[in-house]
Image: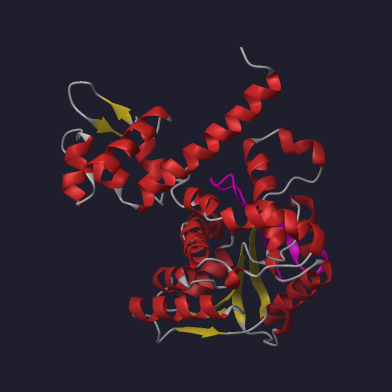
Amino acid sequence: MGSTAFDRLYGFVLGYQATWVTDIGLRAGLFSSIAESAAPPTSDELADRLGFDRRLTGVWCRAAYAYGVLDWEPEGGYRLPEGFGPVLLDPASPEYLGGRIPFIAALYEDFRAFPDLLRSGRSWPRSEHDPWLLSALANLTRPDAAMLTGQALPNAPVAVAALEAGGDLLEIGSGAGHHLVHYARTFPRARIVGIEPDGPSVALARAAISDAGVADRVTLRQEDANGLEDRDSYDLVVLSITLHETGGEVAWANVLARAHRALRPGGTILVSELPYPDAVAEYRTEPVYQMLAGVQLHEAVVGCGMITQGELGELLRTAGFRDVRVVDQPMKTRHVMLGER
């Protein structure tokens, strides 16, 4: 019987290994192939179907079974446990983790570098990381757009009506452009503008816009939100997991003030942020808060700040927004607020 300290730390080791085993299954298409099988395949059948090495496929299947992300039938083969399909493979599920697991695995560079960065205090931009990180981050945040239009925006009917009639939407921090494409398809009469300062992300976004065939209604500008000059131009401004990346407290206030000015009178702002708790003691009260405490290591390395739930509301009110309110939505890893100019 191990000590409490041993058991806790040993659990961390097992969780680390389980994360990597699950990430391999997602990136290699192993989970998808198993889910699509008419009958549970053996590891050899799975390897042959995907053109993989039988020995290595068997090693992965046994590890996935050991960690409970696959079930095994002695007279058959491997299958997904009950309920794992939506969580691993369905981005539309509010419990979807198939994007977060590769993102956590991609943070290995930051965890390795953190001891040295403790001494220097320097930031390390995402653009200088393994490109895998940007790809993982884009896939992690892609499902957010459907949540914002499906659960959050119905709470702002004036903005929805304006966009449906051919209004204007600004997204601050467009990343790889998946949200811009989603907004263009959701509001086929609206004009969509995105701004994004990161060059590699802008390249990904422009390719996504072109591939989706919406370039006639979507404009993307490589621009820092701290210099936004648009005035009285939009019916909706969206910041999705973006505000904390624009700088520190002075920058957050500046960006929100500029967003307020960019809206038409009566226009709506929609801000989605990581749901950091307001007090240190709360970090042990919810698993999502524990996860965010770890993610903050990455956010700090790349130069991002941390906005707590209470601070976000105060920032919006200070910027001049009225009727600031929290939106009830199903994603535990998001804190969504609305306000009007």
- Can residue 326 be seen here? The reply is no
Instruction: Give the image location of residue 31, x and y in percent.
Output: 31, 43
Residue 319 shown in magenta = yes
Q: Please give the range of residues in magenta.
A: 317-341
Q: Residue at x 49, y 64 (%)?
A: 138
Query: How has the structure been colored for display?
Result: secondary structure
Instruction: Give the image location of residue 197, x and y in percent.
Output: 62, 79
Residue 74, located in which quarter of the rendered image? top left
Residue toward you, 324 or 18: 18
Instruction: Please identify the quadrant where the C terminus is shown.
Output: bottom right
Instruction: Give the image location of residue 332, x and y in percent.
Output: 58, 44
- Can residue 103 be seen here? The reply is yes
Q: Residue at x 35, y 76 (%)?
A: 212
Residue 316, located in which quarter of the rendered image? bottom right
The correct choice, above or below, for 115 with respect to 173 in the image is: above
The correct choice, above or below, for 180 with respect to 113 in the image is: below
Residue toward you, 18 or 188: 18
The correct choice, above or below, for 295 with respect to 68 in the image is: below
The total of numbered circles placed on residues is 0
Q: Residue at x 83, y 71 (%)?
A: 250
Residue at the far top in the pictured view:
1
The correct choice, above or below, for 6 with respect to 334 in the image is: above
Residue 161 shown in magenta = no
Residue toward you, 167 or 195: 195
Instruction: Please identify the quadrant where the N terminus is shown.
Output: top right
Q: Would residue 182 appear left or right of 339 to someone viewing this image?
A: left
Instruction: Give the image location of residue 198, x and y in percent.
Output: 59, 78
Q: Would residue 317 appear left or right of 175 to someone viewing this image?
A: right
Q: Residue at x 26, y 32 (%)?
A: 78
